[in-house]
Amino acid sequence: MSACLTVGHLQEFNALWFEVQEVRLQRDAQDRVTWKLTAFGEYDSTSAYRAQFLGSVKFDLRWLIWKP
């Protein structure tokens, strides 16, 4: 299986590289994971479910189906 490397991939890699350069790890510090989709930074299944539909368009399908 061969991977196709595009200009977009290289641009993403380059941007990530510069972001990672700013990270400073501390030996005795505990890792902290935060969930950006809730106010308190904690994961919940409701916010994960809603994230699946970010950017989608809502409309009433029954009129599309039953009108004809």
Image (spheres, rainbow, N blue to C red):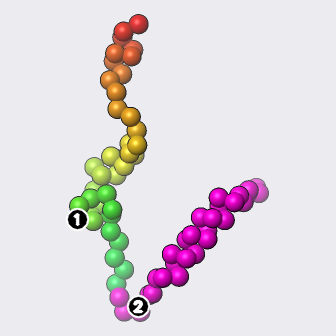
**Quadrant of the frame with the N terminus:** bottom right
- Residue 5 drawn in magenta: yes
Q: With respect to residue 26, does 54 lie above or below?
A: above
Q: Which amino acid does the dot numbered 2 rest on?
A: Gln
**Quarter where residue 29 is shown:** bottom left
Whole-percent x and y of residue 27?
A: 41, 92
| 8 in magenta | yes
Instruction: Describe the element under mark 1 as helix, strand or loop.
Output: loop
Residue displayed at 59% across by 64% down? 12
User: Dot 1: few (<14), some (14–19), or many (≥20) neighbours within 10 Å?
Assistant: few
Q: Which mark is residue 68?
A: none
Where does residue 42 sit, x and y in percent of width and height?
A: 27, 64
Amino acid beneath label 1: Phe
Q: Which residue is mark 1?
A: 40
Residue 26: which numbered mark, if any?
Answer: 2
For residue 30, above or below residue 56: below
Q: Quadrant of residue 5?
A: bottom right
**The residue stretch that appears in magenta:** 1-29
Q: Nearer the viewer, residue 15 or 65?
A: 15
- Horizontal arrangement in the rendering, residue 48 relative to residue 10 (left or right): left
Q: Secondary structure at mark 2?
A: loop
Relative to 25, is 62 on the left or the right? left
